[in-house]
Amino acid sequence: MLCVFANGAKSWWIFFHEEELRYQLSAVVKHFGFRPTFGRYVCYIRSSPNMWHKMNDLRVTCVEEEAVDTKVCSR
């Protein structure tokens, strides 16, 4: 994996040390619309290892991790 930043710089450290990188995803933001300034956003927040919350304009609901994977990764 080679990480390219907004300014065009490349991180070769990530390329050679990918196996050392570990993280736990804690939030996902998904946009629905044609432009960032038009449409709506939905946020998924991890509150514990097996519990996620879906936040939209009107309410907060609990969702399983599988629902986050399915909804966030699909187009």
Image (cartoon, grey):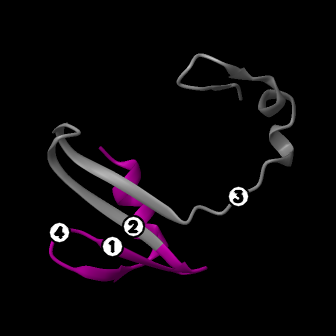
Q: Nearer the viewer, mark 2 or mark 4?
A: 4
Q: Are marks 2 and 4 in contact (CB under 8 Å)?
A: no
Type of amino acid under label 4: Asp
Q: Which residue is mark 2?
A: 44
In this rendering, the answer to whether 55 lies above or below 8 is below
- The quarter in which the C terminus is drawn is top left
Type of amino acid under label 1: Lys
**Distance between the Cα atoms at labels 3 and 2?**
17 Å
- Residue at position x 80%, y 23% in the image: 12
Residue 50, horizontal then vertical, whole percent: 56, 81
Chain-order first, disc 2 or disc 1: 2
Q: Nearest the camera: 64 or 26?
A: 26
Going by the image, does 21 lie left or right of 62?
right
Which residues are the magenta region? 46-75
What secondary structure is found at the residue carrying circle 2? strand
Q: Nearer the viewer, mark 4 or mark 1?
A: 4
- Residue at position x 27%, y 48% in the image: 31
Q: Which residue is mark 3?
A: 23
